[in-house]
Image (spheres, helix red, strand yellow):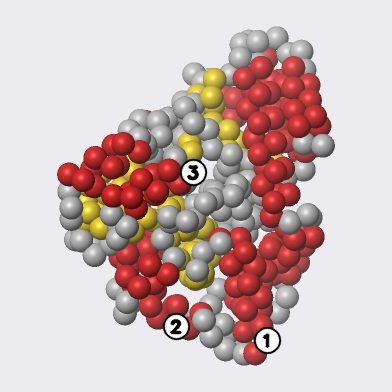
Amino acid sequence: MLLFTPGPTPVPQNVRNAMAQETIHHRTPEFEAIFEKTREHLFKLFQTDEVIMLASSGTGAMEAAVINLCHDTLLNVNSGKFGERFGKIAAAHGLGQVEIKNEWDTPVSVDAVVDAIKANPKIDAVAVQVSESAGGLRHPVEELAAAVKAVNPDIMIIADGITAVGVEPIDVSNIDALLAGSQKALMLPPGLAILGLSNAAIEKIGSGKGYYLNLASEIKKQRQNTTAYTAATTLTIGLLEVLETIGQQGGIDALYEKTAVRAEAVRSALEAIGLHLYPKSPAKSMTTIDDVHASEIRNILKNDYGVNVAGGQDHLKGKIFRINQMGLIEDYEMSWVVNAVELAIDKLGCRVYDGTANKIFNEVTFKLGK
Ligand SMILES: *Cc1c(COP(=O)(O)O)cnc(C)c1O
């Protein structure tokens, strides 16, 4: 079965092998050396002043960022399930909360954010997804961050890059916390979350908030190449292997370039067979198609062609399907996937198969990408 869900993504064989080694103790020079090397790679990937790894799923990084960087009122951008989650985290911790809500296909308006922070001077942090995975859309995060900082540089910008870090370059000049999770673009099993932090964020964190998610404790320890609590040793070993593999395959810029071409190729192929892109501003992490036959298409992909793609949640259940584009993906696998989609809509009587999806996919991949 080809796993083409936008998280979890497939774990490369060499990474699985690296994680199959004997467990080592986390308070040893051996593990500290691995931790140190991993941190060095992460600084290059995140381009932030500090980088912290947490043994948690991605939501742990979201909660850590909110409780440590928001001390009064959070403005969260809700164009999907993950944006909504930031608001729920703020509410769970008794923080003030203002939300800008849009349909899941609609990116946030930078003006709406600026108006909201001007209207409510208590807002001291803004949380937004770079790529909102619920509908596969890209928010204008860099622009938003710059606009917020121009009004009030003390407002912290929390950018959830769980389906963006490792997918495309992100300008972190105005971002205070950039979040990633192991099971999306980083091609690992779930269980490790990563936060890139600005110096301004570190200053605001001070002595930190919370206990397990207290970032001050982690900053102090991780600067010494260890962790406050037991490190996710196996996942850290896997992460180092992933980051070294990306390096061996031409480096992170080459991966960004390949992912951009792949995203373009998949979108063009599926539009060429009459399918409709759901988000108004598609992210590079995934292609989301809205279609009345979304569920049937997913079933045919799985049962007839061995391809697992994701559906939608909540009000989009049965209405969309989402194809992953993150990670080190072979062109021949993606080519199989777009062809299988074309075969599926033929089977459903929507459009007669003529190989267009694959033709367009290959044209874009091999003309743009090579
Ligand atoms: C998957 C995801 C999360 C949540 O991660 P968990 O690992 O499920 O806790 C948060 N934000 C985005 C954009 C995601 O795609």
Mark in the foreground, 1 or 3: 3
Q: Secondary structure at mark 1?
A: helix
Q: Which residue corresponds to mark 3?
A: 131
Q: Which residue corresponds to mark 1?
A: 30
> 14 above or below 213?
above
Residue ID at (53%, 24%):
277
Compared across the picture, whether 3 is left or right of 292 comes to: right
Residue ID at (42%, 69%):
199
> 41 above or below 119?
below
> 18 above or below 333?
below
Q: Which residue corresponds to mark 2?
A: 220
- The quadrant where residue 46 appears: bottom right
Disc 1 and disc 2: Cα gap in Å?
20 Å
Q: Amino acid at mark 3?
A: Ser
The yes-or-no answer for disc 3 within 8 Å of ligand 1 is: yes
Q: Amino acid at mark 2?
A: Lys
Number of the label disc, if any, that sits on residue 297: none
- Foreground pick, 349 / 192: 192
Residue 20 at x, y = what percent? 72, 71
- The quadrant where residue 349 appears: top right
- Callout 2 crowding tier (Cα within 10 Å): few <14, some 14–19, many ≥20: few
Residue ID at (62%, 56%):
186
Mark in the foreground, 1 or 2: 2
